[in-house]
Image (cartoon, helix red, strand yellow):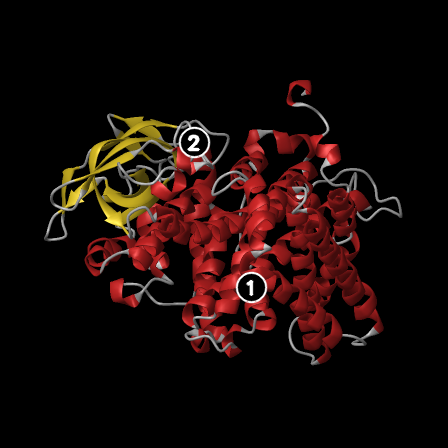
Amino acid sequence: MPSYNAPVKDQMFVLNDLLKVGEADIPGYDDLDRETLEAILDEAGKVARDVTAPLNTVGDTQGCVLENGVVRTPEGFKAAFDAVREGGWTALDCDPEYGGQGLPYVVATAVGEQFSAANMAFNMYQGLTHGAYSAIHTHGTDEQKATWLPKMVTCEWTGTMNLTEPHCGTDLGLMRTKAEPQADGSYKVTGQKIFISAGDHDMSENVVHLVLAKIPGGPDGIKGVSLFVVPKFLVGADGMVGERNGVSVGKIEEKMGIHGNSTCVMNYDGATGYLLGQEHKGMRAMFTMMNEARLGVGLQGYAQAEAAYQNAVIYAKDRLQGRDVTGAKNPDGPADPLIVHPDIRRNLMEQKSFVEGARAFTYWGAQMIDRAHRNSDEAANGLISLLTPVIKGFLTDKGFEMATAAQQVYGGHGYIEEWGMSQFARDARIAMIYEGANGVQALDLVGRKLAQDGGKHVMAFFAMVTDFIKETKGRSEGFDKNFRDPLKAASKDLQAAGMFFMQNGMKNPNAALSGSYDFMHLFGHVCLGLMWARMAVAAEDRLAAGDGDAEWLKAKVATGRFYMARQLPMTATHLNRIESGADPVMALDADLF
């Protein structure tokens, strides 16, 4: 069975040496000293390793079962969920007014990586709840917050998001679920939703569904959509769970992966619901939840890659196969370990350099969310809005690719279920699809985010990269050659792609949209290149000061050199594809496919 150990040393490096959280001018960050952070991550890592990771295979093999209208989770899940709740892990960054601990989001992100890597399906129950909490916290009335949030912070009550219907996914304007106003101010919600993660289960006493629906007589399409709180059980004036609401599980979806999470068809039959936010402004409220969820899904992508990579390294060091072409490294044995072979090294370096770069990128994004919320920083809010589709789309695409690369290290054993590697690939695959399929993320990036606020956010990103390149000029011959120059070339590719869209997108929108997916990946590589260059500076500075584990820091720099030399040059390929325009993509009539 696969194992998992939280990468606390690398997490601490990113938080302290790259992001310097203890020195940041963000309220709450002055409490994030090294000792506090390490204590939090160490304890979370123990829970991930000892409580939830051992249930990953259990969840995959047993799945969830619908019995007499009740969803039963896999063996051990409820006890583990209670342990996570009672440890306060669901409340890390929640509002203290409702029982939360008030820690910055970046801390919750680091802990969330551990829990997601250990058991992605299990962690989704609390992850979805946190998203629903955020939507209610932002858009709810004082009464709604007092009613729902305290029990959601502790996960005594869990939460969901209900968007998709059988006939509409991304195009939510086509939805048919209705919400009929009632005399008491509530609504009767009727319709069916599908693909609802954590839709029902036996680990909490109530499930608080956030449901998109249309109020009759409202505007057509997406402008007529409103958001409603629809609980599994109604809640009385005393705050206690009461009678069952008109919501039920139609079935549990049979999925490729994340079997331990109950993905449900939800039926609403005149269920009592309460408007959250304003009428016909449901998408605004839901996107509070969606944007947080999209960073969390990007995290899921690289977290699965991290778990798969850890196990691939163990196997590569242990499995004897063939001889090193330069001379036997295990002369007393029948063969050398796999890890001596260059192609295995290439494979593992691709995984390692991606995971560590993705971690830095995601934590940087979480820090921007903290800055936006805690400092009311509009520039940070604009930048993370721009980068969210890149975090979600690029990191999940590459995360799945790296999970399958780890599987490849095992050869035939990677294809056999008892080794557990296929689960990482199967679980990672959904991250490319849900919370907005990656093609949609690319369209959002190119079609909306680049031009947002007159394009000032992408220009701010370009300026950030340019300033870093100027500031580090002449730092050392090795740094210029291995980090600064490759980042400069990649940044020029990104700017050239943006210029192509500006020059061609208005007269031929397909020219931009045909290149949107490549642009998302080009942007992702530049972001990871920037992270690696910054991490190299941090590692080299610590080495020069004689501070820390020298061998570990040298390995960090060497991993960064690999990414800059072997992965970052993909920006040129993506630019060439973008500049080929729409013709190669749109050449065939539909009936010729």
Where is residue 591 shown, x and y percent of the image?
65, 18
Identify the element where label 2 is drawn.
loop
What amino acid type is highlighted by mark number 1? Answer: Trp
**Which is more toward the observer, 401 or 343?**
401
Residue at which label 2 appears: 168
> Left or right: 314 with respect to 560?
left
Closer to viewer: mark 2 or mark 1: 2
> Left or right: 272 with respect to 453?
left
Q: Quarter holding the C terminus? A: top right
> Left or right: 470 with respect to 366?
right
Q: Disc 2 and disc 1: Cα gap in Å?
A: 34 Å
Where is residue 211 shown, x and y percent of the image?
31, 41
Q: Residues within 10 Å of mark 2 (few under 14, many from 20)?
A: some
Name the residue rendered at 70%, 59% in the picture: 529
Res. 212 image quadrant: top left
Label 2 vs 1, first from the N-terminus: 2
Which residue is outermost to the right? 326
Where is residue 2 shown, x and y percent of the image?
55, 42
What amino acid type is highlighted by mark number 2? Answer: Cys
Residue 459 appears in the picture as rendered: yes
Residue 204 appears in the picture as rendered: no
Which residue is outermost to the bottom? 545
Q: Residues within 10 Å of mark 1 (few under 14, many from 20)?
A: some
Residue at which label 1 appears: 364
Identify the element where label 1 is drawn.
helix
Q: Is residue 145 above or below residue 66?
A: below
Res. 530 image quadrant: bottom right
